[in-house]
Image (spheres, helix red, strand yellow):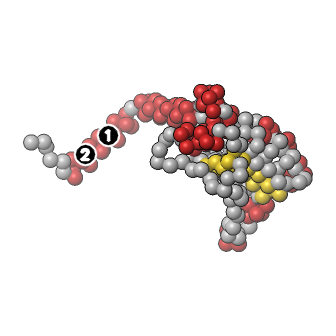
Amino acid sequence: MSELVTPDSSRRKKRTLLQFLSDHFQDIQTLREYLLQKQISKVNWENRSFTNIQEKYGPYITGAVFILKQGGAVKFQDKEEWIRPNNRSHFLAELQKFQKVPVEAVDASGCAINYQGLSNLLPLKELRSLSLRRCPNLDDWCLSRLYLLAGSLQELSLAGCPRISERGLACLHHLQNLRRLDISDLPAVSHPGLTQILVEEMLPHCEVLGADWAQNLKLEPDKQPLDTSSPLSS
């Protein structure tokens, strides 16, 4: 029979483990570095280029599969419903009927898209609406690539992206067809009020959202209004 584990023996084991970890800090640091590298590798794998799908099915299916695998949603041209990921990981069979139908809207909110992964979206030349809200890996370098969508993009949301600063927003001057831009809640932007004014001058025909957030930074906590902002319209 195996030895019974009592509460006292369990606590002793925990103390022993903590002492071991304290005595081997270098090993813990190595473990942390290993886990970080493993997470980076996972993100890079999720953002790989789907070359085989691109060659066989074209850019629309490639972009749709990439977003669905990331956990986002896509909307094809002249279709009312959004396509969202289901319990199955294989989307090709369902998407083949849209092979010649352009993707007009992408909701990638909270997805792990990075600089490399954008390569799967940039060929979507009819894309009108793109939501990149709360994407943790989206940075200024990523925004420098969006000029390739300048011919069609009308709505863009960057709200809540922690790594986007004024430098990245300056790259959006190419997007002169934008009609709605959400730059609220960008913690890396040092001067949100001034930044919004500059963006509005840079994109004179675009409604720039973010003024409420910029003003809230100056208000006392008990005087801040409730957040009533809405997501990008579909």
46 w.r.t. 221: above or below: above
Which residue corresponds to mark 2? Answer: 12
Name the residue nearer the viewer: 190 or 24.
190
Residue at point 67% right, 48% down? 76
- For the residues marked 1 and 2, what is the alpha-carbon distance in whole angstroms? 9 Å
Q: Position of residue 124 (x, y in %)?
A: 72, 39
Which residue corresponds to mark 1? Answer: 17
Residue at point 73% right, 35% down? 123
Is residue 19 in view from this perspective? yes
Residue type at mark 1 is Leu
Mark 2 falls on what kind of element? Answer: helix
* Residue that lies at the very extreme toward the front in this rendered image: 97
N-terminal of the pair, mark 1 or mark 2, is 2
Q: Position of residue 179 (x, y in %)?
A: 82, 54
Q: Quadrant of the N terminus?
A: top left
190 w.r.t. 167: above or below: below
Q: Count how many numbered circles sit on residues in the image.
A: 2
Q: Quadrant of the C terminus?
A: bottom right
Is residue 139 in view from this perspective? no
Name the residue nearer the viewer: 2 or 6.
2
Residue at point 76% right, 63% down? 212
220 w.r.t. 175: above or below: below
Residue type at mark 2 is Arg
* Residue that lies at the very extreme toward the bottom in this rendered image: 223
Q: Position of residue 74 (x, y in %)?
A: 64, 48
Mark 1 falls on what kind of element? Answer: helix
Q: Are marks 1 and 2 in contact (CB under 8 Å)?
A: no
Crowding around mark 1 (Cα neighbors within 10 Å: few <14, some 14 to 19, many 20+) is few
Crowding around mark 2 (Cα neighbors within 10 Å: few <14, some 14 to 19, many 20+) is few
